[in-house]
Image (cartoon, rainbow, N blue to C red):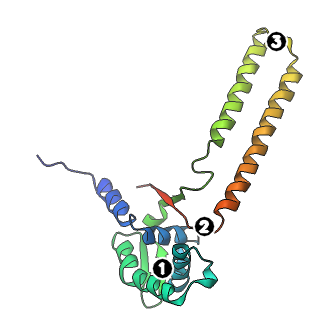
Amino acid sequence: MSVQRSASALSRERVEHALYNLRRRYVVYYLSRNDGIANLDELSTQVAAWENDAPTDSVPDDRWKSVYSALHQTHLPKLEEIGLLWYDRERTRVELTPRGRNLTLYLASDGFTASPWPHRYLLVCALGALVGVLLWLHVSPVADLAPLAWLAIFLGVLAGVTVAHVQSRRRWYHRFSGARPDFFLEYDD
């Protein structure tokens, strides 16, 4: 019995297969963060920098040449073949296609990606709403405290969560600033 898959499932499978290679993920990530266009020199420099955990201005020439050659001969043609980018070999210009722009590569180490902060804000709002309902229903002991006192408590908790979030984000930024990205993929068919 043969199982038929939709064209979009096959397409997604091809995209995921192509992006299994880290250099290809670097290419799509870099392009998506730079208006979808780059020249091969700058692209090779950044990919080599990520691979060597080095600043872009101190990438060894032999590493840059190796990345340039691999992108030119293998990785860019593969990404072009599945329709994620256009590669003009004569001008060494690379550009995301509309299909490539539908890809979103998230940094797995991004504090916003795997962060519990949205849940914490939602919890604070839910508790505030619960207190509001209990006040409206005059339920003791909640109703024994003045509504203005509850408002001050709510704003204090919200301010505390916000300050903790800002500090967490600042620590994350200093830890991962300039670090090699690691990814997970979201694709809108």
Q: Is mark 2 on a helix, strand or loop?
A: loop
Q: Which residue is drawn at 13% across and 49% down?
A: 2
Identify the mark nearer the N-term, 3 or 2.
Answer: 3
Q: Is residue 115 above or below residue 122?
A: below
Identify the mark nearer the N-term, 3 or 1.
Answer: 1
Identify the mark nearer the N-term, 2 or 1.
Answer: 1
Q: What element carries label 1?
A: strand
In the picture of the structure, the residue carrying the numbered disc 3 is 143
Q: Which residue is drawn at 48% across and 79% down?
A: 94
Answer yes or no: do the residues labelled 2 and 1 have beta carbons within 8 Å? Answer: no
Q: How far apart are the alpha carbons under marks 3 and 1?
A: 64 Å
Amino acid at the residue labelled 1: Val
Q: Residue 36 shows which numbered tag?
A: none
Q: Which of marks 2 and 1 is in front?
A: 2
Q: How far apart are the alpha carbons under marks 2 and 1?
A: 24 Å
Q: How far apart are the alpha carbons under marks 3 and 2?
A: 52 Å
Amino acid at the residue labelled 3: Ala
Amino acid at the residue labelled 2: Ala
* Residue 10 spot, x, y in % from top left: 29, 57
Q: Which residue is drawn at 38% across and 64% down?
A: 20
Q: In this view, does 139 lie above or below 159?
A: above
Residue 54: image quadrant is bottom right
* Residue 181 spot, x, y in % from top left: 55, 64
In the picture of the structure, the residue carrying the numbered disc 1 is 94
Q: Is residue 63 above or below residue 183?
A: below
Q: Nearer the viewer, mark 3 or mark 2?
A: 2
* Residue 145 spot, x, y in % from top left: 86, 15
In the picture of the structure, the residue carrying the numbered disc 2 is 179
Tell which of 138 and 99 is nearer to you. Answer: 138
Q: Is mark 3 on a helix, strand or loop?
A: helix
Q: Which residue is drawn at 86% across and 20% down?
A: 147
